Amino acid sequence: MLPSATVGTLELRSLVEPVRRIISRLKGHYLKAEAVDVEFSDKLVEVAQINSRGEKEHFYVPYDKLVIGVGSVTNPHGVKGLENCHFLKSVEDAEKIRDQVLQNLERACLPVTSDEERRRLLSFVICGGGPTGVEFAAEMFDMLNEDLSNFFPKILRNEVSVHLIQSRGHILNTYDEALSKYAEERFARDQVEVLTNSRVKEIRQDKVLFTQKGEHGEIITKELPMGFCLWSTGVAQTDFCKRISSKLDVQSNKHALETDSHLRLIGAPLGDVYAIGDCATVQNNVADHLVSFLRTLAWEKGKDPEKMQVSFREWRNVASRVKKRFPQASDHLRRLDRLFQEYDKDSSGTLDFGEMYELLRQIDNKLTSLPATAQRANQQGQYLARKFTRMAQAAPGLRANEIDYGDLDEAVYKAFKYKHLGSLAYVGNAAVFDFGGMNFSGGLLAVYLWRSIYFAQSVSLRTRILLAMDWSKRALFGRDLMNF
């Protein structure tokens, strides 16, 4: 809901809950500092903070279990001039955007501002057609359309322009196509310019350079005057994650830390370090684990796993092991009989190693990365909390039997399975919803549904009350356009 805070629809304090308030309920300990590095062998986190003398001081914090959830930064995609952009990843970013928007409006009112400069100041450009970019464009249009004429000269409204640049063929390209088209039609009606199949080349202090394909396939460079630019085009690793990834040779993903299906950081000591949220991705590699799936069957038969023939009954056993190890593959293993017949190329009634490998490789290719959304991070956090509780309960028995090695995670708890609850986006006094194939879009009713979902998912009763108060204040008095 950060886009709502950038235009005064919501107050920033309504979106966040103090960490100490949450930690105090659990009698935990909180340090406000920057994680710099991790010493895996000594189980220490290097931390830095500015002391009372204004100097950066480093110290170490020991851990038994370490959970990395540092989020991500915006992906620059190699574009020049991002220092001229704003980002929208935190409350601080929202506050900066709000100040910049109001400053532009105030400067546009000055009698010494030329017509050309006024149009530039009132040109708002959003790079990225994902949910964040779309919702910001919608909130910006609503503020300019509903509140601008009440507080600023009416001439400004005619010179305001909002532009959305998207590199793909549609905005909201991860949603159902019908919802993407609805959002585009809504923006077209609201005179929000959507530039699809456009790639930003460079962002200068007063303009955005981007490329489009011409009628004959040639690349044409265009420019767009801008007084404000928001860059919202995917995620990239933080410096902390890059530092950790460089220490672990098996970490090959350049965009996120790779974990196994139990959310354990691959390459780190087993069961010590976990990673969740935007900074991590779950590695599947179902086909690469084929030998381990077949090894148990091979030992029972006294055969080499690579030379073994698997019957349909044995294939069902292998499939159950795959589902347990990789829960995200369950949806692709529903019709076991159909899969067995499809990949039994020689119609022998059995699958050899090559046929099994090809079957699991195709399933592997169908598995996509988990979305970098709040609901994913929330589910992963709850999963680890339940797992750690279960491991703590099992600890006395493990110590009594002198068991302190092996795959304890798998022994006490199941692998993580992400359950997608749906996607939603606000598109200017309207909203779109994508609930696993069930799509819904509309006006006022959809907006209230959109609000109710965020209201229910708020962290605490305090934030829910503040949200309700902010929406009520906005309805009665308009948006808060104060600039400090």
Image (cartoon, helix red, strand yellow):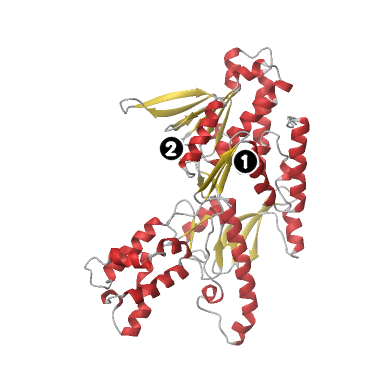
Q: Quadrant of residue 393?
A: bottom right
Q: Position of residue 384 (x, y in %)?
A: 60, 65
Amino acid type at circle 2 is: Arg
Q: Position of residue 328 (x, y in %)?
A: 47, 61
Q: Which mark is residue 64?
A: none
Q: Which residue is mark 2?
A: 168
Q: Quadrant of residue 109?
A: top right
Instruction: Using the rendered image of the protein, determine whether residue 63 is visible from the camera's viewpoint.
Output: no
Can you tell which of label 1 and label 2 is closer to the viewer? 1
The answer to whether residue 434 is left or right of residue 392 is: left
- Tell me the residue at 44%/36% (across/down): 167
Amino acid type at circle 1 is: Ala
Instruction: Using the rendered image of the protein, determine whether residue 84 is visible from the camera's viewpoint.
Output: yes
Q: Nearer the viewer, residue 316 or 308?
A: 316
Mark 1 closeness class: few <14, some 14–19, many ≥20 residues within 10 Å = some
Q: How many marks?
A: 2
- Tell me the residue at 69%/23% (across/down): 148
Q: Position of residue 293 (x, y in %)?
A: 38, 73
Mark 2 closeness class: few <14, some 14–19, many ≥20 residues within 10 Å = some
The answer to whether residue 342 is left or right of residue 129 is: left
Q: For the N terminus, which image quadrant? A: top right
The answer to whether residue 271 is left or right of residue 479 is: left
Q: Which residue is mark 1?
A: 446
- Tell me the residue at 54%/30% (across/down): 187
In the image, farthest residue toward the bottom: 401
Q: Which sits earlier in the primary sequence, circle 1 or circle 2?
A: 2
Q: Nearer the viewer, residue 171 or 238?
A: 171
Q: Nearer the viewer, residue 310 or 254?
A: 310
Judged from the image, the secondary structure of the residue bearing numbered disc 1 is helix
Q: Quadrant of residue 198?
A: top left
Above or below residue 336? Residue 3 is above
Q: Position of residue 313 (x, y in %)?
A: 35, 76
